[in-house]
Structures are given as structure tokens and as C-alpha cells.
Image (tube, grey):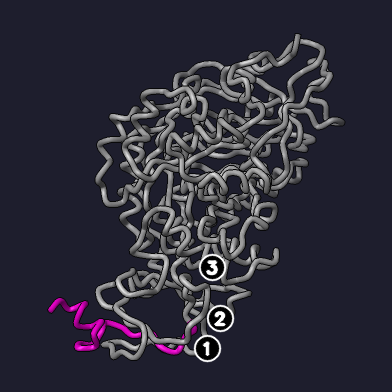
Amino acid sequence: MPAGLAAARGLEPADAVFSGGDVFNPFACAWERTDFAVRDGCVVGLGDYEGKREYDLAGTYVVPGLIDAHVHIESSLLAPAEYARLVLRHGTTTVVADPHEIANVCGAPGIEYMLAEGARTPLDILVMLPSCVPATSLDLGGARLAAADLARFRGREEVIGLAEVMNVPGVLAGDEDLRAKMDLFEVVDGHAPLLSGKDLNAYIYAGAGSDHECTTLAEAREKLLRGMYIMIREGSTEQNLEVLLPLVDACTAPRCCFATDDRHADMLATKGHIDDCIRKAVACGLRIELALRMATLSAADRFGLHDRGALAPGRLADFCVVDDPDRFRVLRTFKRGVEAVDAGYRPPACPAAPLQARVPEPREIRVAGRGEARVIGLVPGQIVTRDLRCPVDAAGVPDISRDILKAVVTDRYRGGGSGVGLVHGFGLREGAIAGSVSHDSHNIVAVGVADTDIVRAVGEVVRLGGGLAVVFGDEVTALPLECAGLMSALPYEEVARSLAALEEHARRLGAIENSFMYLSFLALTVIPDIRVTERGVFDVRAFEDVALFLG
């Protein structure tokens, strides 16, 4: 008789028995005071068992391991093993990751890097293959991945589907290569901000099964009613939880889950991960049991992960222990029945991804013209932008009184030129900020007041070989990102401190909170309304490059 079966029947002792805790059951959204037994990393049964090791959990609450349904690990600025060190402390045992940031820089070797680094940690990093590298046919990053490039990853244990299909126009037009990518996997995630009506029907008909880009309750409700899973997102700047939470009730919770998408290391260190989403949901009035359902079984079911999401016979013994459900402070995390003890920092390998950028001269980023201009309007707590039409005299830029600044994107791959646009909402009164994290092509992006400071900030990023920088005159604060210009090779504690120093310097210059995360999305050509790329201003709705000045 197999050992696990014998242990489940009580004929042999289990490896471990956990007793005395109140166990959350996501099938019923209820609590059970029960013991449970573990053999070979899986739960064999609940009830009265004997084990080789006994864990007394009396007075605590036991919750299945938390699952992040959609995340870009690179956006934390941490290498995968450091990311895992941090989120395991917060009760997360599985993340569903889309490595399209590093894929845009390094191509297929970038995906291989994330898989290899992920194998160094007890955290389960399950990969959805990036569907759109580059994000659109107009974007020029470091790589292009066709269906044939992705097909070789199919069948890998850690690869479970196709990640967010951002090229909505391509899906609706029946693009052949995109269709071939979607046909590779049964599980296909969507990315369709503001899509509605018949075009939404067509997008879902083509195979997209989820969406994490909803910013209004009406948008989320329509997509849910048409059969999509809704991933309620709460990142550093994508803060949709409070607005979307009324969607969730006892009937809809099985179709809703949490995602952090893009969350910097400092936010992970100070506020948490999916545990933070749970606390915020409860603070907004959601029953703790529904929040826990979303954070566990709902996410597992969305991806067909029937080996996790609940503490039930045959499922992984992944769980966290908390002292009070409503406060939800994680005391301990267990992975496959073994406590996840922090083994400390281990330096990561870093993929070679040299910057080939040419730092522009101040004269190259000057703008000329007068009249009505297209100005990128930041939206607080969101990554969508507004297409502001403002009267502008180029000779008066920067216009500090109206908070209209220059935004510059410099080609990092081919030593090409720089595109220039205007942006409202950063708040800088002096100096400049720049970074090599610039979704999705990850060119170098900068915003600033004086052209000389903008050029110096870009130059600092180039000098570092990738990184983030704040510059004002001779004063420079910077964080090197040695791993493909996207992630730091430092321990998460040091990255969080460095991020805090960067933000504090930027705030002294007048910048908004989380300025580097907002900066990183200025060039993202698949989120409305307008963006700036190395080519200049891009109109997302029209899906074309446009002039800075109208007429």
C-alpha cells in the first residue's frame, strides 16, 4: 500500500500533524477546528492522526497558502530568490508570474533565467509565457518572440499558460501569430483595459479568460458576466481594490482573485503582499472569509491548480498561520508541510543585457511649436493616462505653474535617438528622475525640469548599466539594477532602503509619491490614452504615433 494512502487511513504515522488551530475551509468559506496530517508534502487527512512530528497551533488560525494571480516579479526590482524571501514572510506560497519584462529585454534566455532563478526558492513561481514581445508591432525592444519561440517552453512543469494578451487590436483582427500563441495553451490571461460590448465578446470568444485591468465597477461587472475571471489588482500605482470590491459577494467570489501586478520592494517590505490585499478588503467591508476565498481557492481554480488552494486530502500542505483573521498578521508560513525559514541572502546570477544607449545632448530633446499640445495626464492610483489638450508654447516648457514637464524616452538597444513628450502630474519643481524600467520595451525614460538635469539623469542610468536615478545639479541618488537593467542584485532589505532614499530625494524636488512606478509606465503603448516612446508621442486608442502639437 502506498505510504500516503496508509497515512491517510491512519494505518501509518504521518510525517507531521498540525493540531489545535482553526482551519479555513475555502470550499464552504467557513472555519473548522481540526487537526490535519501531512505526508510527503501533501495533506493526507483532517481529524485525529498521529505523526512523527507534532505542531501545536492552538489559539491560531490556519489559512491555505496565499496565491498572487498575476505578477511581474521584475517590477519588484528584486531577483526572483530575493522576491521569494520577502513574500514568503507574508504567507504567499504561490505566484503566477509573467516574465514579459525580462523577455522584452533578453528574449527567451530571459524566460530561462527566471525559471532557473525561481527553482532556487521554496516559493512556487509558476510562469505564464509572455504573449506580446514586443507589446505592439510598432515597439522596438530587445527581442521578438513568435509562437515557435514559446512552443519550446510548453510542457515544462512550471509553465502553465499564456500571459496577458495585450495586443487587443491583433486579437480582434485575427493576427495569425497571436492566434498561434493562444492555441498553445488552454489557460490564456487577458489584458483589455476599457474593452466593452461586441469587441469584448470577440476578445473572450478568441480565448482570453481573465482580466486584471478593470478600473471601474461597471467594467469589471460586464467582464465577469461575460465569463471572465476578474483579478482585483492592488499594486504600487495600480490601486483598483476599493473601487472593484463591491463586485464580490458569495456568488462571485469564486470568479474573483487578487493580483499585485507591479509592486515595488519597498511597498512589499512595509505593507505586504496578498496579505495586504486581504487586510484592505476587510477594511473596505468585505467578509474575511470571502477575501480568503479569493486569495486561495479562487486563484487556484482559475489556473486549474487543483493541487493547492485548500487544506484538503491530496493537496499541497501550503499554509500560513495568523493570530487573528481580521488583522491578518502572518506569524509563520509552511511550504509542503515544512516551515519556510529565511535562509538569508544568496547573490543571484545576472543575465548579460548591456545598454547600448547614446545619451542625448540637451539640444536633441528640445521641442518647438506653439498651440494646442497633447499632454500625458497622470491619473493618481492608476496607470491609465488622460489625453490632455493644453495650450502650450514650447519656449515656456517646463511650465512649473501648470505642472507641465518634459518626458524623454531614449533607445537603450541600438544607440538610436530619443522621443519627447509632455506630461502633467509629476509635480517636480526642479531636477529630474530617470530609469531603465520602462514598460514594456524598457528603454530609458526620464522626466524633469531642466534639459541639463534630464540628460544627466539619463547619463547616470547609462553609467550604471541600468538603474534608477534622481538628479539635481551635482546631487545624485541612484540604485543600480544589474540584472538586465530591471532588477537589483542586492538583498531585498537594501533595495527597499535604496528605493526609500530615491523617493525621499524625488519628493524633496516636488515629485508625487511612487514617482518611479508612474515613470515606468509612461511608455506603455497598450494602456490608454497617450504615451511617449523613443519615437515620440503615441495615441493608444488610435494605435499610431502622433505629433506633439495638433494641427
Judge whether residue 435 is colored magenta: no
Three-letter residue code for mark 2: Asp
Q: What element carries label 3?
A: helix
Tag in front: 1 or 3 = 3
Above or below, 98 against 49 in this view is above
Magenta span: 1-22
Does residue 277 appear in the picture of this structure?
Answer: yes
Residue 429 x, y percent position in the rendering:
79, 35
Tag in front: 3 or 2 = 3
Ranked by sequence position, the earlier of labels 1 and 2 is 1
The residue pinned by badge 3 equals 292
Does residue 360 appear in the picture of this structure?
Answer: no
Q: Is mark 2 on a helix, strand or loop?
A: loop
- Distance from disc 1 to disc 2, alpha carbons, whole Å, reads 7 Å
- Residue 178 vs residue 129, the one in the foreground: 178
Q: What element carries label 1?
A: loop
- Name the quarter where the N terminus is drawn: bottom left
Label pair 1/2, CB-CB below 8 angstroms: yes
Residue 501 x, y percent position in the rendering:
64, 50
Q: Is residue 138 left or right of residue 373?
A: left
Three-letter residue code for mark 1: Gly
The residue pinned by badge 1 equals 59
- Residue 70 vs residue 415, the one in the foreground: 70
- Residue displayed at 63% across by 67% down: 279
Ranked by sequence position, the earlier of labels 3 and 2 is 3
Bin the neighbour count of mark 3 within 10 Å (Cα to Cα): few under 14, some 14-19, many 20 and up: many
- Residue 183 vs residue 373, the one in the foreground: 183
